[in-house]
Image (tube, rainbow, N blue to C red):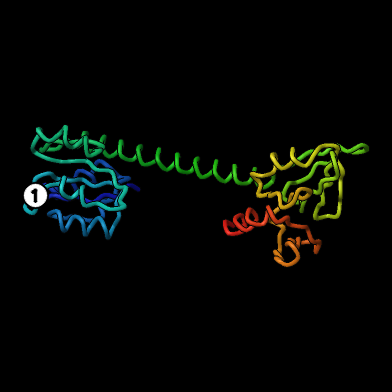
Amino acid sequence: MLRVVIIDDEKKARHALRQMIEISCPTVSVLSEADGVETGLEAISKYKPDVILLDIKMKDGSGFDLVKKLMNVDSKIIFVTAYHEFAVKAFKFSAIDYLLKPVDPDDLAFALKKAEESINKEKNNKYLESLLENFAGTAKQMKKIVLKTATSIFILNISDILYCRSDGNYTEFHCSDGRKPLVSRPIGEYEEMLTEYNFIRTHHSYLINLAHANRFDKNDGGAVLMSNGESTPVSARKKDVLLDALNKL
């Protein structure tokens, strides 16, 4: 149901629009009427309509004055006026349509249908954007990594990796389920790969997942206590980098 507010300082004009809508537009509901800028703003604020049927020349100002005062309102505007010379200005105010009095019922129905299609399109676009954002977030959270060791191929959820430890040109992965696959690739390659997933290099030999960091102890050079109870060292030159990352969590 399309929700409409009619704003016009002529009672007969408001009544005529309401009658046309009741007869020709069964999916449109008139929520309220107003006779000027101030009363119109009150009605819009109260009812938050989908569409505003708006006169231009009114006793306490113009329809353009009202539009300028609208804050955080997504209503579609259809100007309804006896003055054709304001059409260009109306569309500069992003009007959906511009109807001349006396209003033709078919023109009114068409304008309201156009407004409804515009609203539905925007809703669909917002839904798709939200869906894509959620999908991207889920994909990032559930991202997997494939590790090839001398004897096996491990497929791990990145979120299950506690930390990586360097052993020369090898990297040992410590996982939440206790697995420790050893891969013949240097830790620097995995640092580049995992940084976007909230991993941080805290030591020449350690790359930790901040999601599994439980506590940072500053004593004795510094160490991070991981969620499995293990302690990973923090080098002096990495301490500030770690603190900065923790402050951003």
Residue 186 vertical placement versus 208 (above, below)? above
Residue 75: x, y in percent?
Answer: 29, 47
Q: How many marks?
A: 1
Residue 49 vertical placement versus 111 (above, below)? below
How busy is the neighbourhood of tag 1: few (under 14 within 10 Å), some, or many (20 plus)? Answer: some
Which one is nearer the viewer's eye here, 243 or 225? 243
Residue 177 vertical placement versus 150 (above, below)? below
Which one is nearer the viewer's eye here, 248 or 56? 248
Q: Residue at x 59, y 56 (%)?
A: 244
Q: Residue at x 73, y 67 (%)?
A: 219
Q: Is 193 situated left or right of 39 in this image? A: right
Residue 125: x, y in percent?
Answer: 45, 39
Residue 131: x, y in percent?
Answer: 54, 43
Point out the residue furthest to the right here: 151
Which one is nearer the viewer's eye here, 156 or 36? 156
Q: Say which quadrant the C terminus sits in.
A: bottom right
Q: Is 123 situated left or right of 56 in this image? A: right
Q: What residue did someone put label 1 on?
A: 58
Name the amino acid, label 1.
Met
Mark 1, secondary structure of its residue: strand
Which one is nearer the viewer's eye here, 244 or 94? 244
Question: For residue 210, what is the image quadrant?
Answer: bottom right
Residue 239 vertical placement versus 54 (above, below)? below
Residue 25: x, y in percent?
Answer: 27, 42
Q: Residue at x 74, y 51 (%)?
A: 203
